[in-house]
Image (cartoon, rainbow, N blue to C red):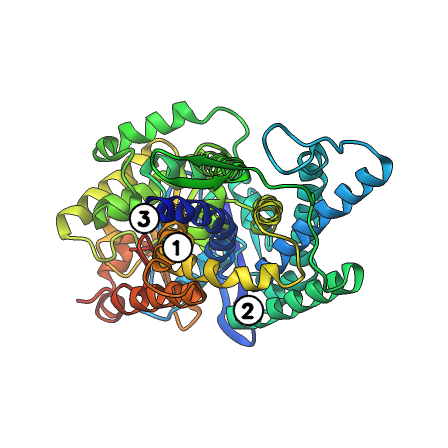
Amino acid sequence: MLELLIYGIVLGSIIGLGSVGLTLIWGITDLFNCAHGDQITAGAYSALLFVTLFNKMGILKGIVGPFSFSWGVLVAFIPAILISVILAILIDRWVYKPLRKAGATSITGFIASIGVAWALRGTIYIIWGADFHFYNTGLRPTIILHNIGIKFRVDEIFIVIISWLSVAVVYLFLSKTKMGKALRALADNPTLAQVSGINTERMLIWAWGIAGLLIAISGVLYGIETQLRPEMGWIFLMPLFAAVILGGQGSITGALIGGLVLGIAQQMSTAFMAPSYKPAVAFIIMILVLIVRPRGILGRRYS
Amino acid sequence: MSILQLENIVSGYGSMEVLHGVSLNIEDGKIIALLGPNGAGKTTLLRTIFGVVKPTQGQVLFKGSDISGTPPEKMTKKGICYVPQEGNIFPTLTVQENLEMGAFTREDDWRLRMEEIFEFFPSLTDRRKSSAGELSGGMRQMLAIGRALMVNPEVLLLDEPSTGLAPVLVDHIFERIAALNKQGVTVLLVEQNAQALSAADKAYIIEGGENKAEGSAEELRNNEEIGRLYLGR
């Protein structure tokens, strides 16, 4: 059981990291971004592009310490983040901004984001094909703690630390900086934010930029944890969706708790039933939450 | 001298015209009340002054220059601030963060100003770190006004600050508005509450998007017809 708990925390951290960007955009723009998952895929593949490039150039091929990935993967985080941030901002400028100007509802935005998701995935299929890809094909070292009977991969320590570190940085940004507070103000009360002189369109660039950053990091981490395939993000969107609903619209802490609850519940359930029922567990929890507490664990209390 | 002048403002939302030519003259350093029944266009007028809604005709003159259609973020820099009637706080932000957002367009140090506002509304001081959404109605109103004061405005536009408050709190809010005015802030006070008349130097009454009457509080109160129709007597 302890082992399942640890797997649950690893899975929960990845879900949590992925869902923070989603809930941020949902809270600030009222858009439930269905392309979030495929943006994660794009982030993972952007890193792959650079890892492949580094390999061709014959640089950064060495494996990092006890992990399974090369220095190339670590360095590729940077261009992957840049690409993801620019992509997120461009999608907003080209797709959602015209919709906002036209006074479209959040449902219209939701449907448009499904279109964006398919376009992104199609592009990835065209460039990389439907095959699986790995950043590094070598062994994936594991740690076995014999006295308590736990086995996990060394990479997972890295994944958990980077996930929580990224979330902590974003959390500090939102609670301590002027821009961060203005973003929360915008999510709270867009009209008053405008009246206070907060320029909405400029703030949205920040919001999408931060979402893009988190998206790239979760994409690469997810790629390290499993493997890269064009459907990875789309399938990953489902537990993210559940975690965000669980946490409540726009609540970062809620999304993190939601992610952990889902990750742990999914892994624990494998002790009692077949692992293929894991996604069902996530959705049963989500449905129960929606029935009992429709605004989520930490959803907004005030209207 | 008038600090804010509205000349024949025609304004509304899309094809729905709400104001059909309203003129106001707001003198520097005065409290001007704007009264009128529900749906008279009072809120639309404030939103038009503040640039949230653009007038289709007419001019808004601030110190003699046309500012109609200037976006809100530039208004706060010019020294005009607006406190909407509803949704005038950021509920999940703390009291202090709410005030900080009021200073968003300020590039200089605003911390001293924040302390002044806490002195002006002492009951907010103990609640600095509370979420604004947890405050009572009266405190919310004080916070909303405090947020607008963060930029040291010359003109304050207040939309029905007495709404939903107990009479004792209404008195307190009006007393604070008078105190602000003594500090030199010009106030345009939109109200349905006729009590606003006592606080004001001059009042305008609008109805159906048009000017109905104007005059000193005294004059309006002594006018039989106006008293009966608009001041609830």
Chain letter for the residue marked with disc 1 in the picture: A
Q: Residue furthest bottom?
A: B15
Q: Is residue A262 visible?
A: yes
Q: Please give the residue where the numbered disc 3 appears in the rendered image.
A: A1
Residue A102 vs B124, above or below: the answer is below
Instruction: Provide the secondary structure element on which disc 3 rests.
Output: loop
Q: Please give the residue where the numbered disc 1 appears in the rendered image.
A: A267
Closer to the chain start, of discs 1 and 3, is 3
Q: Please give the residue where the numbered disc 2 appears in the rendered image.
A: A110
Query: In the picture, residue B112 is in which quadrant?
Result: top left
Closer to the chain start, of discs 1 and 2, is 2
- Identity of the amino acid at label 3? Met
* Side of A170 relative to A146 (left or right): right
Residue A249 in percent (x, y) is at 40, 57
- Say few, some or many: other residues with alpha carbon within 10 Å of mark 1 (under 14 / 14 to 19 / 20 or more): many
- Say few, some or many: other residues with alpha carbon within 10 Å of mark 2 (under 14 / 14 to 19 / 20 or more): some
Residue A88 in percent (x, y) is at 65, 52
* Side of A267 relative to B64 (left or right): left
